[in-house]
């Protein structure tokens, strides 16, 4: 058995209480780091993702600086859509953009379902490069993917869009085509997750940033069956812990708890204790510092970090993280401050 099995993070993902709380941050690689910006000036986002050495370097930057207990491979939830036939780019100052959004059922039938080895070979190579470095440090690497619902919302809206009116309209007007789209995505996503695990990712996380726009009923019909099929497909091929981050989706937690995820990532709209109660007190929970606080006063940051750590002691197990991705204007010294507080906070078992 690999020694990573006994790392702080993997123990917490299995639900074991640890005397020190493991810690990593969503979007821990990125523009708030000067060493990232330096590379980013020379390369586009897609170039960085598609060059395994660069992706590996950027993944390791926050590990070197902050000695996080977990690492997440540098990629994006959207780049795997390119192999399906969707033209994606990341525009400076604007974020991601899709140039040929889905408008008709024909657009859905045209979509390809590439295997991960053909679609994201560069990410799989980056995963192996990083994993061989991190093995020495006993730090696990996470692979990830977007969920079919969140990916569809980008494919239909063309960009991040509050409310998702086009997406919901498309699903309502074309239920069969919606299911076809979800099924295609479920295959791509599950294959990507399994492939990242085989390449060296010890845990895998499914990001569902936009699912909170759905009511419970809409969630049950539009998203849930396809999440279930991903869990089934992934669990048939790997025993890596599978985590779920559903943003703004606390009304869905009572449903999410029965889907079969191993751990849940919690956003900053709810306390960890409330999330724990809504999920029968049986999940390792990851979260949930508001990333905005990392840009504010040190006193408030320290106070909130300690509150979250304290709440964490009452959970099955706790992984300290943010309630959403780190913001570009975050001072790295504030990240260090939180990192040190978490490291030195001793839990009585
Ligand atoms: O966490 C990590 O360090 C790994 C890398 C990672 C990125 N994107 C890199 C990235 C991960 C896990 C993601 C996930 C992702 N991407 C999500 C799900 C999680 C979430 O944040 O809600 C979503 C919705 C996306 C789509 C996306 N990509 C958006 C909305 C944006 C624009 C916002 C922004 O921060 O610019 C991106 C761009 C992006 N993805 C950047 C990075 C480092 C910035 C690109 C740049 O350097 O210009």
Image (cartoon, rainbow, N blue to C red):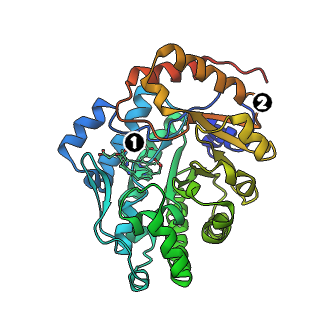
Q: Is residue 94 above or below residue 255?
A: above
* Tag shown at residue 314: 2
| Residue 219 spot, x, y in % from top left | 64, 64
Q: Residues within 10 Å of mark 1 (few under 14, many from 20)?
A: many
Q: Is residue 253 above or below residue 87?
A: above
The C terminus - image quarter: top right
- Residue 219 appearing in the image: yes
Depth check: give the residue in front, 57 or 317.
317
| Residue 262 spot, x, y in % from top left | 70, 51
- Residue 1 appearing in the image: no
Q: Is mark 1 within 8 Å of ligand 1?
A: yes
Residue of label 1: 59
125 relative position to 12: left or right: left
Q: Is mark 2 within 8 Å of ligand 1?
A: no
Disc 2, SS: loop
| Residue 319 spot, x, y in % from top left | 63, 35
Disc 1, SS: helix
Q: Nearer the viewer, mark 1 or mark 2?
A: 2
Q: Residues within 10 Å of mark 2 (few under 14, many from 20)?
A: some
Total number of numbered labels?
Answer: 2
């Amino acid at each position: 058995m690999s020694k990573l099995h006994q790392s702080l993070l993997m123990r917490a993902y299995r639900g074991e209480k640890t005397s020190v709380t493991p810690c990593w941050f969503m979007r821990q690689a990125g523009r708030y780091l000067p060493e990232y910006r330096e590379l980013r000036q020379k390369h586009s986002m897609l170039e960085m993702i598609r060059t395994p050495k660069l992706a590996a370097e950027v993944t390791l930057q926050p590990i070197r600086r902050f000695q996080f207990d977990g690492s997440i491979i540098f990629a994006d939830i959207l780049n795997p859509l390119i192999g399906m036939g969707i033209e994606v780019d990341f525009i400076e100052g604007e974020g991601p953009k899709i140039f040929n959004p889905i408008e008709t059922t024909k657009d859905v039938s045209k979509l390809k379902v590439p295997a991960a080895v053909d679609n994201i070979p560069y990410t799989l190579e980056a995963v192996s490069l990083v994993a061989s470095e991190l093995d020495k440090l006993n730090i696990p690497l996470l692979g990830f993917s977007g969920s079919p619902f969140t990916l569809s919302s980008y494919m239909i809206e063309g960009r991040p869009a509050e409310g998702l009116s086009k997406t919901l309209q498309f699903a309502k007007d074309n239920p069969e085509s919606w299911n076809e789209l979800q099924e295609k995505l479920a295959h791509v996503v599950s294959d990507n997750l399994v492939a990242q695990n085989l390449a060296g990712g010890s845990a895998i996380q499914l990001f569902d940033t936009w699912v909170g726009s759905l009511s419970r009923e809409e969630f049950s019909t539009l998203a849930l069956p396809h999440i279930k099929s991903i869990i089934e497909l992934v669990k048939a091929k790997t025993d890596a812990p599978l985590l779920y981050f559903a943003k703004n989706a606390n009304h869905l937690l009572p449903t999410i708890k029965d889907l079969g995820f191993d751990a849940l990532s919690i956003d900053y709209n709810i306390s960890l204790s409330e999330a724990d109660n809504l999920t029968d007190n049986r999940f390792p929970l990851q979260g949930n510092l508001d990333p905005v606080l990392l840009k504010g006063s040190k006193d408030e940051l320290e106070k909130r970090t300690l509150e979250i750590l304290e709440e964490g002691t009452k959970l099955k197990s706790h992984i300290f993280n943010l309630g959403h991705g780190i913001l570009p204007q975050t001072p790295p010294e504030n990240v260090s401050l939180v990192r040190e507080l978490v490291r030195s906070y001793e839990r009585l078992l």
